[in-house]
Image: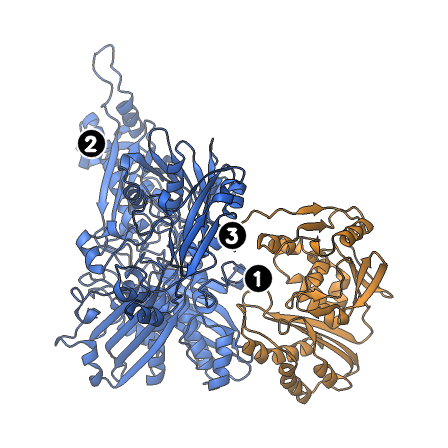
Amino acid sequence: MAESVIGKRIPKVDSREKVTGQAMYAGDYRMPGMYYGKVVRCWEYASAKVKKLDFTEALKMPGVVKILGPDDVTKKPYNTTVMKLLVPEIFGEVFGEIADLNIFNKIVKHQGDAICGVIARTEEAAERAADKIKVTYEPLPVLMTCEESKAEGAKKNGYLFTPLKPGNKAFDLPASFFPNQRYGWNDKDGKTAMELFDKCDYVIEDTYYVPKQKQCQMENHSYVAHYDERGRLNIWTSTQMAKPVQVLIAELFELPLTRVRLVQTIVGGGFGVRLGMIGEPHCCAMAMAVPGHPVRMEFLREEDWVASETRYPGHIWFKCGFKKDGSPIALDSMYMARKGGYYTHGSGPPFCFAAFIHGMYKWQAMGCQTEGYFTNEVPTGAYRGYGNPQLAFSGEQMITRMCKELGLDELEWRKKWHKGIGDETWLKGVTFASDGLNDCLDVAAKESGWYEKKKKYAKQTGVKRRGLGVSVMQHTSGAFPMLLEHSVCTAKLNEDCTVELMQQISDLGTGGHTAITQMAAETLGFPMEDIHLRSGDSDMCGFDIGAHASRTVYCAGPATIEACESVKKQLLERAAQLLEANVKDLQMKDKIISVKGNPQKSISAIKIAKEGVYNYIDAATGKTIGIPGQIQGYSSFFAKHCSPPFGACISEVEVDTETGEIKVLKLVNAHDIGKAIHPPSVEGQLEGGAQQGLGFVLTEEYAYDKMGRVLNNDFTDYKMLGPSDMPDAKIILIESAPDPIGPMGAKSCGESALMGPIGSVANAIFDAIGIQFKEAPITPEKVLKAIKEQGLQK
Amino acid sequence: MASSRILPEFELLIPQSIKEAVDLLGKLKNKASVMAGGTDVVISCTKGFGSPNVISLAEIPALDYVEYDSKSGLRIGAMATLQQVADNADVQKRYPALWKSAAINGTPQTRNMGTVVGNIMRASPSGDCICAILAIGGKVVLRGSKGKREVSIDDFYIKYRETACKSDELAVEIKIPAPAAGSCNAFARMTRTTLDLSKVNVAVRLDMSGKTVKEARVAIGAVAPTTIRLKKVEALLKGKQITDDVLQKIVETVPTEIKPIDDVRSTAEYRRDVAGIMVKRIILEALGK
């Protein structure tokens, strides 16, 4: 056995090509005969009807090949998401899944809706021609809040986003599936949360607001599509979900899968924005209009802002009841989300919001209702955390306030009342198999100086006030059993006894490719450099869901392990035959297979691999030399569980009480990883997540004018934290609770890192000045206004 | 409205001398914009606010100077970049307000291209170098067909994005007097994140005689259509020692002198609430307190 590579701080397999600029992103591809596509979008209105579309002047522009309007492309409606592939059809119907998008539109439902597409010989020609297209609009009512949308939808001839959704209600939890339209549970006597509030000593009720946040991935959306001479539609894209998107494209353009080839290019950041289709339908439609010519299409940053998806904003209402000693009795809640112009992920993130309440604390009864209305905003979809960041901001602040008012230690309360082994996770009927949360809390408390500093800061005076806040979370590793989690791996043994893995692994920069390669090397006992992961091309790879729900290591890793175990088993079986020994008596080390306790009786695995391929006939004997057949391992793996990881985060902030400015001084995030396959990648995930979580709680939100147009569609006016804004972040990986189901003990880390910073910073601000903020982001403007109105509460 | 990264077509004119540039301006009048580093002009073009003609100063020799002597003070040529100014030892020592306004301006990339004179000429109400120079005092040197003239920075800003520079004039230099003994200056700004435009910026110059303020110049940006001087605050300071009472009066007076608005970066209310505090703090900072 070679030295184990699991848990080692080795370089990522793809880091050199990325830092030297050799990695090919979709936008880097140039092909012979390539054309350029430009989508013409509606920038003037958020809600309008296209009255007239005039291409006359644009067609006269040099270099223009074709201009496609709504009637020149398929009118088959579609949905960007792959959700329909992940659940049985009947389930989708119950939840109200619809397809309401068109490639080019005659009705504008949000700023940035696509109107038509220009194909030209150069990018410049396409842009100049796009500028000459004349679109005449008739403005329609602009609905920017759930209330406006609901009221308009209730009118007899009110404006409806889609006839498929009466009253403009995009989704709710169906009563046929959810009693009282709530996800949750009743107490042991069958009483709902609502029926238990009377029994509580202390009831807290509050409404929170969570912002519309953009993923802000580094790579702009870029595509190349080519409808080739064999009638195959090829698409190069950095989608997160390569195989499901191949299926969606095949369905949209009514082609068999043999005629759709999807190549996943290197992904320059995903965070959920590429969870499904974005510009793929437009690029493919343009390519199909010019067979034989690849068409390259790239979004500008401002297009990403208005024509891809965002986090779900909205209002969250909580009512919670406790006993005097803090025992949690009942929780009732409602998440009213603004959907944006199209259905896309529908009830997904709001349902998951409810689900993450379900998985966190031991209430006697809990219920959560979710609803959403269409608005004339950029559609909402997947963004790292998928409902959980919204809970971190609201739920974790509520627990902290309760603890403060009842005089309880908020850290101890969380240790005592969080769910653990044997309790139901976020999904009904699925129980926790491991729980490292108390260790996370203890380590974070120690590292942050929680108890000492809490005491010290209790007696502060002066302009600048410091505070500490804690927040915990539980997430998921893949979405089984709610959603399909299927991954296929083929491990081909080369004739020199190295291994080629063929597996569709989406690495969004997460280190997924590295971890998968490590798991293969570990299983086989081969060095890392003898494993090569081939990924990305649908012509080569079997099925895989792609990157969502923090699933890659947890759901795809086992497929890799199974396929490699199969390779190893076949090698040992051949060795047993050649050595005239039993398989169970054999061992393999450094590619030498020998009989345990008798190292002289051995054979080289390299020889077996070589003779399997070059299986010559011995002229002297007339028999074959070695055992024929190239060895391949294969696995079609379905996840068995979702092993939720826990996490605890403590933040220390300083609030300037004269200006309202907030400085995050330190952040300690301890994560219950089970087993870190590649620790630097796990730490990278947790650091990157902190940047997005801090953005959610401190700076990031879409700003719209009254017409529904985005006022901050660039990095000048939409503010993420930059490197110099980041606090000292201490990331701690807790491996004291390896998961009995996860591969090699691993649980997920992809999305987990956002939640802790959100809840803990909000709670630290509360600790510093005694005022709790119900609206995210918590800006200096809000802080100063609150201090002015309420005075320092501490 | 459109979205494009393709620059609209314009004539790029590259004069080889100041005279040639001035002649071009005289000929083209309002139909030309002057480009030094291009960090603002090019962005304006892609956003559809460009001119049909762009006059680049790139090939005019010897405009990229930052020079100081104790008699004539500091001279900054039209092509001196923000980074050059930030790196200059005299600026660092004698004009900490200007140094800071250049050193925090934009990003390392834009500081290497953008110029201090460009920042002055853009006349943005939130321009950081404008705020610093308005407090320190100085003159903008303009060259036109009728020769050279110097306009005090106090008279330079007329209204929103409009300066005393005529359409046929070229700003070639900023002159800033050498600080007298006992004079100190400082600049600060407030932003959402480190790389950002100012929500509010403030700068002061205090000419001290012992503990007494002989003269004060206080400038504030992003709270009115142009960067402004706070005359009432200056009057409160003049001839006084800086006591808590004086500072408290200043905090209360500042909001009466400004007219901020709501925008994506902040609110009018917030700007009013913090402007006084920022002025108080920058006075203390200038005095090394």
Q: Residue furthest right?
A: B71
What subunit carries mark 3? B
Q: Nearer the viewer, mark 2 or mark 3?
A: 3
Q: Position of residue A745 (x, y in %)?
A: 28, 53
To the question of a shared chain for discs 1 and 2, the answer is no
Chain A in the picture: what colour? blue
**Of callouts 1 and 3, the N-terminal one:** 3
Q: Which amino acid, by three-letter code, is at mark 1?
A: Leu
Q: Which amino acid, by three-letter code, is at mark 3?
A: Ser
**What residue do we see at 26% from left, 37% from top?**
A256
Name the image quarter holding the C terminus of chain B: bottom right
Q: Nearer the viewer, mark 1 or mark 2?
A: 1
Give the secondary structure at mark 1. Answer: loop
Give the secondary structure at mark 3. Answer: loop
CA separation in Å, label 1 and label 2: 62 Å
What subunit carries mark 2? A
Residue B3's tag is 3
Chain B in the picture: what colour? orange
Mark 1, residue position: B195
Question: Residues at badges 1 and 3 in contact (C-beta under 8 Å)?
Answer: no
Q: Nearer the viewer, residue A474 or A132?
A: A132
